[in-house]
Amino acid sequence: MGFIRVRVGKDLSDEVDIKKGDDVPGLKVNGKNINNLRYAEGTVLLAESENDLQNFVTIIEEKSEQYGLMMNTKKTKVMVISKIEPPKVNIKVKGKCIEQIEQFKYLGQLITTDARSDDEIKSRITITKSAFTKLSHILTSKRMKYYGHLRRHDSIQKRILEGKIDGRRGRGRRRQTWLGNIQETSQMKMCEVCETALDRRRWRIVTAHLGDGMVPS
């Protein structure tokens, strides 16, 4: 036996007995029949065939009406998950066909018709890049401020940063350096970077206008 609460306006209803749907064929998971997933306002109905799903939808529709509830056909979607090209299905609520989609986001997870994670991985990478881009200015600004501090004080860190190593450089492409990053970020020549960083006021202006090409006079 199962129970469910549904939102009615801003409140939750009393527990509704959904035992009627317990015997509807769903997916077998470790010998147990799973035909629905419920979380907050989102409910997923699971079935192995179009007929089983239509029967389940009809049961939910009829039981909902007994409590004065109606299924929102605009928000309700249907999706077929298959290793091959998914077939078109015709699931109806009140005689109206439910839109069939190729992907759906449920509890933050992007689910697609091929059951693969490729699109989900791409989506997460895009979100991560967006978050990092928002923070990159903060990280760059701190690095620039730190270089200005090192440049204006005679310290072991400054000696290490600006020191040159005797000998010949190895073959191959020159490796990117910390000072090289400072130069690239400031959009100035290295000699200008070294000179400007000695002036705290001018260096603050450079740091405040990162990326807009402004070089203080």
Image: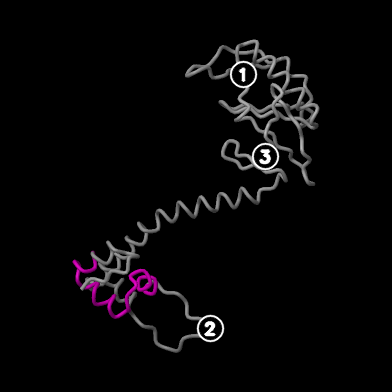
Kindly state the secondary structure of the residue where label 2 is placed: loop
| Within-10-Å neighbours for mark 2: few <14, some 14–19, many 20+ | few
132 sits to left or right of 192: right
For residue 43, which quarter of the picture? top right
- Colour scheme of the rendered structure: one colour
Looking at the image, can residue 1 be seen?
Answer: no
Identify the mark nearer the N-term, 2 or 1: 1
Identify the mark nearer the N-term, 1 or 3: 1
- Residue 122, position in %: x, y? 59, 52
- Residue 117, position in %: x, y? 66, 48
Number of on-image labels: 3
Magenta region, main secondary structure? helix
Residue that appears at 45% across and 89% down: 168
Kindly state the secondary structure of the residue where label 3 is placed: loop
Q: Which residue is mark 3?
A: 101
| Within-10-Å neighbours for mark 1: few <14, some 14–19, many 20+ | some
From this view, report whether residue 110 is shown above or below residue 164.
above
From this view, report whether residue 152 is shown above or below residue 99.
below
Q: Which residue is mark 1?
A: 70
- Quadrant housing the N terminus: top right
> Label 2 sits on what residue type?
Gly
Q: Which residues are magenta?
A: 179-204
From this view, report whether residue 146 is shown above or below residue 121.
below
Looking at the image, do the residues carrying marks 1 and 3 touch, with CB atoms under 8 Å apart?
Answer: no
